[in-house]
Amino acid sequence: MGDANRSSRCSMPQSDKSSLYYDILVDSECSGMVRDDLKEIVKRFSKLLVKERQGLALAAYENDTLVVDLWGGFADKKKRKVWKENTMTVAFSTSKVIGALIVAILVSRGYLKYEDLVITYWPEYGQNGKEETTVEWLVGHKAGLITFDVDFSLSQCNDYKYLSGIIEKTKPRWKPGTVTAYHALTYGFLIDQLVRRVDPKKRGVGDFFREEIVPFMKETNTCSDFFLIDKDFYIGLPDELFGRMAKVTFQRQINIAKYILKDAVYIKVFLNSLLSGYCYWNSPVQSATRYPSCLNLMKPATYKDSRIWKIENLSAFGICTARGLASAISAIMSHDLISAEIWDILSRPTEYVKDEVIQLHHYRGHGFFYRPHPTRKNSFILEHSGNGMQKVVFDPITKVSIAVLRNGLTWNFKKERESDYIASNILKQLK
């Protein structure tokens, strides 16, 4: 991308297919490629990039073909280390989409049903009021388990047998099925336990992903002179790839306070919390984002620790490029890993409901968030946000997947709205 102190050129692949692509000069550190019919996206991305504290990446696939691949800024601004083509970061809760899709794959193969009781596959789960929990409730954040009864250490995060016992003995905070409450950090542990019990090979989410999804992820001619394998989504990052990680940074408390006091979304959350009888220190969000203590989302140092990157858990610990995240979803959609019957179920939310952790109303279902499609009437797109304003959006009908990732975490909801705007423009063009 050139020297970090001067503007650079968005470099595009030159080949016999060069008519599909275009070159453009931009005013910020932007590199990548984009299909010609989506060239306006570069301008929008560049405007977003100049406001970033660190780095930013955007990728989109259509019918398993990479159509947008842009990145820029810094992997580590303090060290003047620029964001490169293969820079990876923590996907945070956009990782949950992969967990929900893995369950959908297993449902498609007939190994379980959403309406089944969890105890059908995991009998020991049926303790302390959890007996009637369905698979749908577990996947859809209605299990009442935003924390477990016992804290555990970082070294125990991959000890699925130990964690199984903790989960089985835990009493849910709410009666299962009665409350939607975002399982910020416990979600991945629950999904992994379920997958291990229904998969015929008894694999966890990491092995299942590597063996059942990665082989379908694409090789794409990118901005380099070689074919880059777009398989850069990891559930448990190998040690030899640590050098490709961007430094995750948090905002200063004073800036966080500014956004909380000024943004209507936070004001609404605050008022809803008061109406629900919660104060800051006893609210469900405090519990959900700080348990287990070793994975506390509010501690800046937590996600700089390379031991975190090795956790095989889809609550928040997918490690990837934006291209890798979008490619994983694209592979699932484009290679019929989920049946048409199950996609029909997934394409619609089950409810519009207030979340007791988030304290906002959303369309929800099957582990996903939904919003109306920007052009198609009576239709939805599936999406998920992640800590610091990460975003993933996909449409199983047009087989479009879009990912936006940043390493400079922010509480500024304007950033997410800008990502939504970019995603909507891509979806409108690829309708």
Image: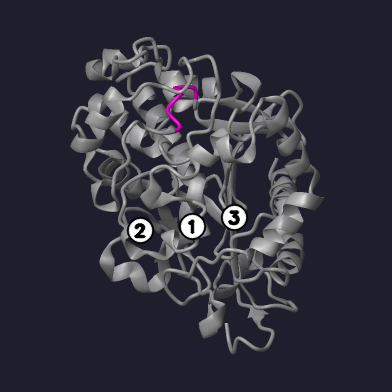
SS for callout 1: loop
Q: Along the polypeptide, which appears first: circle 1 or circle 2?
A: 1
The residue type indicated by label 3 comes to Gly
Amino acid type assigned to the residue bearing label 1 in the image:
Lys
Check the picture and name the quadrant holding the C terminus. top right
Disc number lying in front (1 or 2): 1
Residue under label 1, please give it.
299
**Circle 1 crowding by C-alpha within 10 Å: few under 14, some 14–19, many from 20:** few
Q: Nearer the viewer, mark 3 or mark 1?
A: 1
Please give the residue where the numbered disc 2 appears in the rendered image. 309
Label whose residue precedes the other's in the sequence (3 or 2): 2
Image color mode = one colour
Q: In which quarter of the image is residue 152?
A: top left
- What residue is pinned by disc 3? 388
Q: How far apart are marks 3 and 2 (CA)?
A: 17 Å
The image position of residue 261, as x and y in percent, is 78, 51
Say which quadrant the N terminus sits in. bottom right
Q: In this view, does 128 lie to the left or right of 99?
A: left
Position in image of residue 332 (x %, y %): 44, 39
Which image quarter: residue 17? bottom right
Q: Do the residues labelled 1 and 2 touch (CB within 8 Å)?
A: no
